[in-house]
Image (spheres, rainbow, N blue to C red):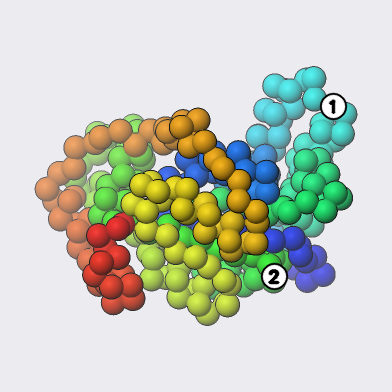
Amino acid sequence: MPKDVVIETPALIHIGAQKTASTWLHKALRQHDAFQFSPLKEVHFFTQVAGGEASDYLVGRVTERVDLALENSRRLAFYKRAYLRQLGDTARVGSDAWYRDLFLKNPVIRSRLRRGLDTVLCDFTPHYMTMGREGFEHIRRLLPNAHAMLVIRDPVRRMVSGFSMTINRKPELASATARQRIEWLESSQPPRGDYRHALEQLDATGIPYSVFAFRDLVGDPASVVQLLENTFGLDHQSIDFSRVPKANSHSGRQPIEPELMERIEAICAPQYAYLRARFGEAFLDRI
């Protein structure tokens, strides 16, 4: 993997957790001039690159979205279409240079940096919290001025919400037996809410980070944004949160069998113990 690509621009990396209003926050921060996003809300770069090679998932996801954007935006200026075509170059997808250009060749970001305006690159990919050490070290190496954020939600409620979302996206699970649902749950959901793992990886790799309680975010988002502004030394800019539509993650309300709920509670029990020991009992009331 090339080691010479380094992105010095400050970056905010939202690593998780899934089902903690990351899509809503993404939409809110788009009102703020300094926080700048790529065309991909969830990039999945650090989870889908190993040894310098991009996974088929990342390549397929990027090319699909680029092709769709080009098809639906025939009136885009030439330079914007050229930017999108470059992003869809399958020979480059997954390289550090591709990730750099995803942001720094974005016409809006490029213009801001040329004018010396405060700019924070934003990558909101909740799946990042499931990464092993290699993924976090990759962030540290490629983005030396990155600051991570982790939003912590009540472990059981987060897992129930994640399970409900998946049921809506995978109808076959709706007709599965309780045992099959439990097997799927055990194979997919625990890493997405493993706060201990994520925090230990951040501590081990030295990536600066902020932890936010879920209820603080949804109850007082202005204070969370102000803390992010302070973190990056940005001037305060008001956000009209009433203009931010509630994100529809298609969670719905799915019935949870007693056996499944019992297993969810057992899986989450160690997370409660860890969070209580690390942040205190009062913190649990805010998640």
Mark 2 and mark 1: span between their CA atoms? Answer: 33 Å
Q: Would you say 56 lies left or right of 80 here?
A: left
- Residue 286 place in picture, x, y as percent: 30, 58
Q: Position of residue 190 (x, y in %)?
A: 34, 59
User: For the residue marked with disc 2, what is the amino acid?
Assistant: Pro
- Sort mark 1 into few (<14), some (14-19) or many (20+) by Cα contacts within 10 Å: few
Which of the pair 90/165 is nearer the observer? 165
Residue at 80% from the left image edge and 25% from the top image edge = 76
Residue at the spot 75% in from the left edge and 68% down from the top edge: 1
Q: Answer whether labels 2 and 1 touch (C-beta < 8 Å).
A: no
Q: Which residue is mark 2?
A: 144
Give SS at disc 1. loop
Residue that numbered label 1 is attached to: 77
- The quarter of the image holding the C terminus is bottom left
Q: Is residue 200 left or right of residue 148?
A: left
The answer to whether 199 is drawn above or below residue 219 in the figure is below
Q: Is residue 109 left or right of residue 202?
A: right
* Place of residue 159 in the rendered image (x, y in percent of width and height, measured from the top left): 30, 51
Foreground of the two, 197 or 49: 197
Residue at x 78%, y 71% (from the top left corner): 3
Q: Is residue 127 visible?
A: no
Whole-percent x, y for residue 154 in the image: 29, 56
Label 2: how many residues lie within 10 Å, few (<14), some (14-19) or many (20+)? some
